[in-house]
Image (cartoon, rainbow, N blue to C red):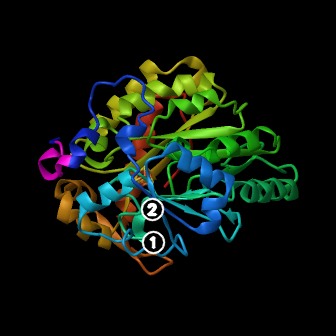
């Protein structure tokens, strides 16, 4: 499949994944060269806010009344150069006001209150930017003690999990990264380290986050089996086209054994699964690569979530402006049906019959090429 390079502005060339695995990286400079920090006064004054500032000593600080409303940052739907620059050069510091754990039940039992929002990467199918507009740089929530205190009390209230479910046989599982990528967040502050440390002390609960970035600094933490990292995987050609600014698939796979050795539970997300010409052959190659490269220890504890692509009409329009080749793969009216989301957005997903057949075929491929890989759920 052709690469997207001929459609991308120069600022993105260095971020397109390569087929050969690069050396291990914690490449803060590639993703973030922060020049401006927009901060709520209380966030700025907090120890965590000061910690973030100390990591970016040359950044100019701009005080703002609310992290939610910074008109000069959010938006920029049609201007990818602008929003990738904002993602690279800007951070926001805010205070998380409402602390609630939302019930989930699919991937995890609960969605934990966010400790950040926004992402420095730019996947073409990403739903995270929709609320703030496409620039959506990382906002770090600095009241980490309040958030960890809330989580500790929430876990205590649940007691012991009464019976196994698709999230985990024993532990209540809390998703940490609904609106961000925790591996990148950990480059910016110690919020993720604090959460990993918290769950190490909670024998009835487990943290969980999906990631598309390899941050080897996380290997230095001590998760003691209480944090699950879900590496998101797709065939190399799909990632090269769609996963802009992320770590290459080969690097993600190469990291999995190391994360298991460091005490993480390591699962994978096949997400999103994009149905296109040749998808079965490319997923076969990916599954064979997992089978060839992963250690027996990693395989023994692995499981997968399979999530078929959901797309969105507004995002389709934006992407046509900067990355039309991605839309050749993502926008398939011949295969998709509309679905109005709870917040009124017009989403599209594969027609029921197409989706059913796709899930079934992928399950067959897993059974054939990676039979050790337990499917936690597929939809
Ligand atoms: S890594 Fe996740 S949060 Fe970041 S752009 Fe990609 S899909 Fe969105």
Residue at image mark 2: 128
Q: How far is the residue under mark 1 from the one under mark 2?
A: 7 Å
Residue at image mark 1: 131
Asked whether disc 1 touches disc 2, contact meaning CB atoms under 8 Å apart, the reply is yes
- Where residue 250 appears, x then y in whole percent? 37, 29
Q: Quadrant of residue 132?
A: bottom left
Task: Name the one closer to the observer, 268 or 317.
Answer: 317
The magenta region covers: 3-10
- Where residue 189 appears, x then y in whole percent? 58, 46
Taking the spot 35% from the left edge, 65% from the top edge, the residue there is 134
Answer few, some or many: residues within 10 Å of disc 2's Cα (few below 14, many 20 plus, some between 14 and 19).
some
Q: Quadrant of residue 193?
A: top right
Above or below for 153 versus 374: below
Dot 2 falls on a residue whose secondary structure is helix
Q: Is residue 325 visible?
A: yes
State yes or no: residue 8 in magenta: yes
The answer to whether the beta carbon of the residue marked 1 is less than 8 Å from any atom of ligand 1 is no
Residue at the extreme left: 6
The answer to whether the beta carbon of the residue marked 2 is less than 8 Å from any atom of ligand 1 is yes
Dot 1 falls on a residue whose secondary structure is helix
Answer few, some or many: residues within 10 Å of disc 1's Cα (few below 14, many 20 plus, some between 14 and 19).
few
- Please state if 372 lies on the left or on the right of 308 as rendered: right
Task: Name the one closer to the observer, 244 or 337.
Answer: 244
């Amino acid at each position: 499949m052709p690469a997207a390079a001929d459609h991308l502005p120069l600022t993105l060339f260095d971020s397109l994944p390569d087929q050969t695995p690069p050396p291990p990286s914690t490449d803060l400079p590639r993703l973030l060269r922060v020049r401006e920090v927009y901060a709520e006064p209380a966030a700025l004054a907090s120890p965590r806010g000061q910690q973030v500032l100390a990591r970016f000593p040359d950044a100019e600080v701009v005080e703002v009344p609310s992290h939610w409303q910074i008109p000069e940052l959010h938006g920029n739907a049609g201007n990818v150069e602008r929003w990738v620059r904002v993602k690279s050069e800007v951070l926001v510091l805010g205070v998380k006001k409402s602390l609630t754990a939302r019930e989930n039940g699919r991937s995890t039992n609960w969605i934990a209150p966010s400790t950040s929002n926004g992402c420095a990467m730019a996947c073409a199918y990403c739903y995270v930017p929709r609320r703030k507009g496409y620039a959506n740089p990382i906002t770090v929530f600095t009241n980490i003690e309040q958030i960890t205190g809330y989580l500790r009390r929430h876990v205590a209230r649940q007691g012991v999990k009464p019976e196994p479910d698709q999230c985990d046989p024993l532990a209540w599982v809390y998703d940490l990264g609904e609106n961000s990528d925790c591996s990148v967040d950990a480059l910016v502050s110690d919020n993720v380290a604090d959460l990993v440390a918290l769950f190490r002390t909670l024998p009835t609960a487990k943290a969980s986050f999906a990631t598309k970035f390899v941050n080897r600094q996380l290997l230095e933490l001590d998760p003691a089996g209480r944090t699950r990292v879900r590496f998101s995987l797709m065939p190399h050609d799909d990632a090269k086209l769609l996963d802009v600014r992320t770590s290459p698939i080969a690097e993600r796979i190469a990291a999995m054994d190391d994360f298991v050795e460091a005490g993480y539970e390591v699962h994978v997300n096949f997400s999103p699964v994009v149905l296109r010409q040749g998808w079965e052959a490319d997923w076969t190659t990916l599954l064979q690569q997992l089978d060839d490269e992963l250690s027996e220890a990693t395989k023994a504890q692995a499981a997968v979530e399979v999530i078929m692509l959901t797309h969105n009409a507004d995002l389709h329009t934006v992407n046509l402006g900067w990355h039309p080749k991605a839309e050749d793969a993502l926008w398939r009216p011949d295969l998709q049906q509309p679905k109005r989301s709870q917040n009124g957005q017009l989403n599209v997903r594969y027609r029921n019959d197409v989706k059913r057949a796709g899930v079934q075929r992928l399950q067959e491929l897993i059974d054939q090429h990676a039979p050790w890989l337990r499917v936690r759920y597929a939809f």
